[in-house]
Image: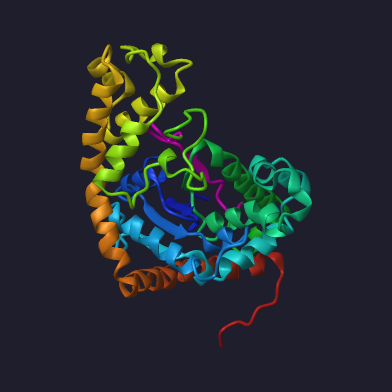
Amino acid sequence: MSFKERVFSGVQPTGNLHLGNYLGAIVKFVELQNQYDCIYCVVDLHAITVWQDPKELPRATREVTAAFLACGIDPGKNIVFNQSQVAEHAELAWVFNCVARLGWLNRMTQFKEKASKDRENASVGLYAYPNLMAADILVYRATHVPVGEDQKQHVELARDIAQKFNNDYADSIAAHGFGEKFFPLPEPLIQGPATRVMSLRDGTKKMSKSDPSDYTRINLTDDADAIAQKIRKAKTDPEPLPSEAAGLEKRPEADNLVGIYAALAGSPRGQVLQEFGGAQFSTFKTALVDLAVARLAPINSELKRLTQDPLYIDSVLSDGANRARAIAAETMSAVKDIVGLVRAKPH
């Protein structure tokens, strides 16, 4: 059975979006909307796997939505919504809780990292959230998922769950007229440079909104002055920039800044090194400041405008949820029939 090509991806509303989110995810979302039917979700149910301030979560949800729009995602062309408005995500996640195996979840590296040594006090939701992530994707029978390398394992789990569901219920799937399989096996989309943007203060650590120092990251809410200050203060080494990529080995901060420049300019790293090879970091940072401000200042301005209009943001989320629900409800009805759950049929 051939499936309609469809992209799904989600971003958690857990604090300011930063340059890493933009270059690693959102800029790809904008490109993909010209090739696929896209569904972009603010995954607030994932956010509450760790405690969130109920007064802060609505603001963060609206801010991520505003960032989507400010960066160029078209809510008319795509579906943009927040996860909790479409109950079928959680409903399908329960079915997948019964399909996925404990051994699969025990291998998920992100749970180990987030739960750390306090695993016994971690929420069940944090442990099982990869099943919800699989439901997010498969409730729309999405075929492609744009992810960074660190999320690829979750897409692989979604494929395993889809495959097991298709195998376990093969006879029922065929009996209900869906052919050999009901769910597609979604493919990860990992594209372009700088899919993994590192901290401005430590090139061995990923740029993170949870880092206590604001100087480790460039937030999409930063104005031109803040962007310039953070880039000028970014950690470097005393050597000039090399002319070839091999010269960036064992120089993580230099490698990170070159990767950021390449991604913002839409140029290969090699081209950046040809242009700036032999230059001191002061020269390169000046060019990077100019480029970053030119790219990010319009986004910052539009983000501020949108966040001051929460009624508009809510209307985008409501419209997107209605459109998403129409697809998800059709999938969930079919899943109930396939699994053997009795549901009321329309007269």
Which quarter of the figure has residue 266?
top left
Closer-to-camera residue (326/192): 192
Q: Is residue 89 left or right of residue 108?
A: left
State the residue at coordinates (40%, 73%).
318
Q: Is residue 255 above or below residue 325?
A: above
- Residue 97 visible, this angle: yes
Query: Which stretch appears magenta?
Result: 181-198
Q: Residue at x 52, y 47 (%)?
A: 210
**Residue 246 image offset from top left, x and y in percent:** 41, 12
Is residue 197 found inside the magenta-colored segment of the image?
yes
Q: Quadrant of residue 64?
A: bottom left
Q: Who is closer to the viewer here, 267 or 164? A: 267
Q: Residue at x 23, y 29 (%)?
A: 286
Q: Furthest-bottom residue in view?
A: 347
Q: Nearer the viewer, residue 198 or 333?
A: 198
The coloring applied to the image is: rainbow
Q: Quadrant of the C terminus?
A: bottom right
Q: Nearer the viewer, residue 263 or 333?
A: 263
Residue 139: % across, % down: 55, 61
Residue 113 location, x and y as percent? 66, 41
Give the side of residue 313 with respect to residue 167, left or right.
left
How far across and how far down the image is residue 327, in percent? 47, 66
Specify whether 223 is left or right of 85. left
Q: Is residue 46 above or below residue 193?
A: below
Q: Is residue 182 visible?
A: no
The stretch drawn in magenta includes residue 342: no
Q: Main secondary structure of the magenta part?
A: loop
Q: How many numbered dots are placed on residues in this image?
A: 0
Location of residue 151 (image quadrant): top right
